[in-house]
């Protein structure tokens, strides 16, 4: 079975469905920002997008968290969900579906899927003995645990011994089919290092895994045996499918899979790779369903080299960061500074320095000083100039001519850091160009048309950069565009492809003669360095 050939103009992507054992931290925000950037880029290009995010609300971890708070689990989940939704709003995440595993219609999908797998003889009852890591919601091999009996991802939470009857999924049956899948579709798992990790894991031999629990009440009962609840991962992966239902549709697999399936991209962190790249395709093979197109596993955000996470208590509060620095600043830092796929350390001083250097100085100042000079030397308008008036080999035009093409490739391959660097090259060249050409001197010498040509080229560079950065910094790009006389708001979702079509705006030379250029306003105020490093 191979991933489906899909319609290139229709693209469904998912973030993981986040555990609601606590309010969201910056690690959860990271995946969601990446997903939103991909979705925005594709919407600009006219593709139909379905961005799915949501929450994973069942299982022992959540049950215990609610118990500790002394409130019913559903009430706890509802509180946490409100917090996730409010963060996504603050971060300008434009998601299409928010999938909750406690939604009643999700249960119908899970039941139907379970029965399909059961019919294929892939579910059986057996005794499960082993070490269970509750924060991971996963059984671990003894050899995977640290000396203190904890798993390396949660070094402060001891794995617990379990000896109980569970339902098992016959994963071992799918070993060869999975190996064939990875071989035939090298792009099924990316980046390559993750693919190798999975291939290596599978080559050691797959064991069946348990998909029910007997002492966890907080979950869906197993169809036909309500003494068991369905394992949280079996339930959660299927919430990607439930999310595909239209609001008014009956919750059947047939309805859910009719339009958007197969999903084109599951964006996940590297810790949940096995579930998505091994268990999930095997479950789908068992249910005889087409497979998703790609699983991309990004790296971890670390603090002092350790994974940031709720269990370790070393997280950063994304609400505070957005309040202090704004959504665009946060989005820019995480997309530009971290190579998607690798780990990246967060340091607030570096964060502030980068935003000041790139957004306030390089980009913001360039716009500001150029517009200022246009007011001063050209009465606020570049009369009759167009890109055609710039000579062949013009420094900025040369960079700008194929910049759009180069940047598209980086968005398509999730190399956002490289895309940002490409765009910054143009911005930095613009600053250098204006310093070297010194239009203030030419103005004094009465060389008006030369002055205008210089300012035109620089302004066009800022415009192109703003457009290409719009999926990452939609609000700043919108402010820049408005100051260039375009009334375009980059938060307009699907409409953008008509208002600011990619084929047109990603090309060099789109500022037209007599563009109405208002008085400049600073777009990004310089940030203060934090008084002490936040922990
Ligand atoms: N509930 C499961 C996912 C089920 S998907 C059907 C889960 N939830 S989680 O909340 O623990 O993690 C969700 C995602 O956040 C994972 O992709 C994980 O890698 C990511 N991150 C959690 N901490 C992170 C960092 N410190 N850095 C980057 N991403 C991290 O797993």
Image (tube, rainbow, N blue to C red):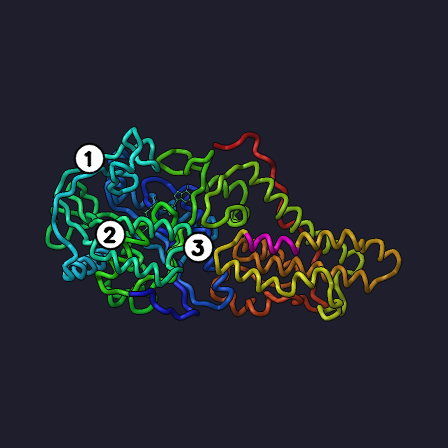
Query: Pointer 1: residues within 10 angstroms few (<14), some, or many (20+)?
Result: few
The residue pinned by badge 3 equals 35
Q: Is residue 47 above or below residue 429?
A: below
Ligand 1 within 8 Å of the CB at mark 1? no
Mark 2, secondary structure of its residue: helix
**Residue lying at 35% horizontally and 52% vertically, measured from the top left:** 54
Query: Where is residue 13 shown, x and y percent of the image?
Result: 39, 59
Magenta span of residues: 418-426
Is residue 205 found inside the magenta-colored segment of the image?
no
The residue pinned by badge 1 equals 161
Q: Say left or right for 415 vs 362.
A: left
Ligand 1 within 8 Å of the CB at mark 2? no
Specify the quadrant that holds the N terminus. Answer: bottom left
| Visible residue check, residue 55 | no
Query: Where is residue 59 shown, x and y percent of the image?
Result: 24, 44
Contact, mark 3 vs mark 2 (Cβ under 8 Å) = no
Residue in the foreground of this view, choosing between 396 and 148:
148
> In the picture, residue 83 is in which quadrant?
top left
**Residue lying at 23% horizontally and 57% vertically, measured from the top left:** 174
Query: Where is residue 275 shown, x and y percent of the image?
Result: 30, 50
Q: CA distance from mark 1 to mark 2?
A: 21 Å
> In the picture, residue 250 is in which quadrant?
bottom left
Q: Main secondary structure of the magenta part?
A: helix
**Residue lying at 47% horizontally and 48% vertically, measured from the top left:** 90
């Amino acid at each position: 079975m191979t991933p489906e050939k899909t319609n290139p103009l229709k693209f469904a992507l998912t973030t993981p469905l986040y555990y609601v054992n606590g309010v969201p931290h910056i690690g959860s925000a990271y995946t969601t920002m990446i997903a939103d950037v991909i979705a925005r880029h594709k919407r600009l290009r006219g593709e139909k997008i379905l961005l799915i995010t949501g929450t994973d609300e069942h299982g022992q971890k959540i049950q215990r968290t609610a118990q500790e708070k002394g409130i019913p689990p559903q009430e706890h989940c509802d509180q946490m969900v409100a917090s996730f939704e409010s963060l996504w709003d603050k971060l300008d995440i434009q998601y299409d579906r928010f999938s909750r595993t406690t939604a009643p219609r999700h249960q119908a999908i899970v039941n139907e899927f379970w029965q399909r797998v059961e019919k294929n003889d892939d579910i059986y009852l057996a005794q499960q003995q082993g070490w269970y890591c509750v924060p991971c919601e996963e059984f671990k091999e003894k050899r995977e645990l640290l000396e203190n009996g904890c798993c390396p991802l949660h070094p402060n939470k001891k794995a617990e011994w379990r000896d109980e009857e569970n339902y098992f999924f016959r994963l071992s049956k799918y070993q060869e089919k999975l190996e064939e899948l990875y071989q035939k579709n090298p792009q099924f798992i990316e980046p390559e290092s993750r693919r190798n990790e999975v291939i290596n894991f599978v080559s050691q031999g797959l064991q069946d895994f348990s998909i029910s629990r007997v002492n966890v009440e907080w979950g869906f009962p197993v169809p036909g045996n309500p003494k068991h609840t369905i394992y949280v991962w079996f339930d959660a992966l299927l919430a990607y499918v439930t999310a595909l239902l239209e609001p008014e549709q009956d919750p059947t697999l047939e309805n859910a899979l009719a339009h958007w399936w197969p999903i084109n991209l599951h964006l996940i962190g590297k810790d949940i790779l096995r579930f998505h790249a091994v268990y999930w395709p095997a479950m789908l093979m068992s249910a005889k369903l087409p497979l998703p197109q790609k699983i991309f596993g990004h790296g971890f955000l670390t603090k002092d080299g350790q994974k940031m996470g709720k269990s370790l208590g070393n997280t950063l509060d994304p609400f505070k960061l957005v309040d202090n620095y704004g959504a665009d600043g946060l989005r820019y830092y995480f997309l530009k500074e971290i190579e998607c796929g690798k780990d990246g350390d967060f340091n607030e001083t570096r964060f502030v320095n980068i935003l000041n250097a790139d957004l306030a100085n390089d980009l913001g100042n360039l716009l500001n000083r150029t517009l200022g000079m246009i007011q001063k030397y050209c009465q606020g308008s570049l009369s009759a100039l167009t890109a055609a008036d710039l000579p062949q080999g013009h420094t900025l035009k040369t960079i700008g001519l194929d910049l759009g093409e180069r940047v598209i490739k980086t968005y398509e391959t999730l190399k956002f850091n490289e895309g940002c660097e490409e765009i910054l090259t143009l911005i930095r060249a613009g600053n250098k160009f204006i310093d070297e050409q010194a239009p203030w001197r030419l103005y004094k010498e009465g060389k008006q048309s030369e002055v205008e040509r210089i300012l035109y080229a620089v302004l066009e560079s800022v415009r192109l950069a703003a457009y290409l950065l719009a999926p990452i910094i939609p609000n700043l790009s919108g402010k820049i565009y408005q100051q260039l006389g375009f009334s375009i708001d980059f938060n307009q979702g699907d409409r953008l492809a008509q208002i600011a079509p990619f084929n047109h705006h990603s090309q060099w030379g789109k500022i037209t003669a007599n563009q109405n250029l208002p008085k400049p306003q600073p777009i990004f105020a310089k940030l203060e360095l934090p008084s002490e490093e936040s922990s």
